[in-house]
Amino acid sequence: MSYNLSAVGGEAFYDSDNNLVSFFFVLYSIAPGSTIQQKIHDQTCFLKSTMPPVRSPFTRLASSSQCSARCGEVATLHGTIKTPVFMPVGTLATVKAVTPENLVDLGAQIILGNTYHLFIRPGHELIKKFGGLHRFMHWNGPILTDSGGFQIFSLQELAKITEQGAEFRSHLDGARLFLGPEDAVHIQEALGSDIMMVLDTCIPYPANRDEAAKATDLTGRWARRSREVQSKTGQLLFGIVQGGMYPDLRRQAAEELIDIGFDGYALGGLSVGEPKELMQEMLEATVPHLPDDFPVYLMGVGTPEDLVEGVYRGVDMFDCVMPTRNARNGMLFTSSGRLVIKNSRYREDQRPVDEQCDCYTCRNYSRAYLRHLFQCREILAYHLNSIHNLHYYCSLMAEMRKAITEDCFMDFRQAFYSQREQ
Ligand SMILES: [Zn+2]
């Protein structure tokens, strides 16, 4: 007996680890002339191409009705992060000059650790013996670790990139080292970070198209290898969109990563010396091609203005050394712009750094005292300045989340700039 069926519907079910538990087809009424084989083939291809599906850790809570800004949550092993979020950088398993308790008080939700640095010193195996990075550094919130790619390129003039990975020398003792995409995943698994990044190749600016295309293709192949060796630890793995300053390469890179399927998507290779307008153009050329139900992370960016412009264009996560590094150099961020604390005009200034700020530093210390500490190179200067700058960044993100929730992000953005012009 032969059947001609008019419609085929199918559904697949997965357990919490994305294992296929079962799938079934529903075959509807018989109708002469239909092509059941082709339909079954189409359905099977559909299931194959989406297996295993990646369950997004991101939940969208609100969106701007006037731009791409959105507000949501990213679920990780060590808690949920409210986005848009700024992640203070803790390169060597410490956010310089502040304690984890300070970070909690000033509103930091997630911090960043550097795989390259921790791999070289003290070594991921040692950190693993202490139960992972969280226990080693006494931070119980979420941690994102980068893959080490950026440091290999920025610290190593003689790094050699092959299909297998990156050969380089330790910046500490010159020892020959190798890091492949699989190693980067294994090191991050040993560190126990909540969000891991794939190893990527960095493209210098400017770079010709051929150079950018080759590096982008290699990053794609490394991304696939990274996903394949990942263990089922519950740690999230983000892909990194490269592509230099070429919109079509960025789009192609985004499509390849989506095909592999990651827990989130990052934009790498921006803020590398290109004009601001070009960075924004690259954001506009990339973010719309990323799945809008997954987190979007702009790596290594940037100034308060960059954060506002990134959120405006749909970015959820940011990191940058700027608030902590500038704090140690005496440059403080305020709602009306930047303040260089060593300037003689603050010698007798009794006001806090920012009269609109309610951080520990602004509640208790004058500009004159902070200037005095900085001039004397007192250790407390670095601590107090870092607290203020990180608080400024975290508060800026909280204000943006509130503005998006109330659907007045465009008003917020306008007020942000007009305060700076005064
Ligand atoms: Zn303050």
Image (cartoon, helix red, strand yellow):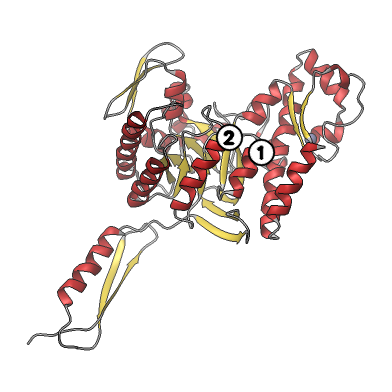
Q: Earlier in the sequence, mark 1 or mark 2?
A: 2
Q: Residues within 10 Å of mark 1 (few under 14, many from 20)?
A: few
Q: Element at badge 1?
A: helix
User: In the picture provided, is 28 more to the left or to the right than 130?
Assistant: left
Q: Which residue is mark 2?
A: 276
Would residue 402 be seen by someone viewing this image from the given angle? no
Front of the two marks 1 and 2: 2
x then y, percent, for residue 216: 35, 36
Q: Nearer the viewer, residue 241 or 248?
A: 248
The N terminus, quarter of image: bottom left
Instruction: Name the amino acid, label 1.
Output: Glu
x then y, percent, for residue 89: 58, 32
Residue 142 in which image quadrant: top right
Instruction: Name the amino acid, label 2.
Output: Lys
Q: Residue at x 80, y 14 (%)?
A: 375
Q: Is 111 drawn above or below residue 260 in the view shown?
A: above
x then y, percent, for residue 380: 76, 22
Query: Marks 2 and 1: in contact by CB < 8 Å?
Result: yes
Q: Is 349 drawn above or below residue 226 in the view shown?
A: above
The C terminus, quarter of image: top right
Q: Residue at x 55, y 28 (%)?
A: 91
User: In the picture provided, is 341 more to the left or to the right than 242?
Assistant: right
User: In the picture provided, is 243 more to the left or to the right than 28?
Assistant: right
Ligand 1 location (quadrant) = top right
Determine which of the numbered discs, if any, sits on residue 305 in the image.
1
x then y, percent, for residue 64: 63, 58
Q: Is 169 drawn above or below residue 307 in the view shown?
A: above
Q: Gap between marks 1 and 2, in whole Å?
A: 10 Å
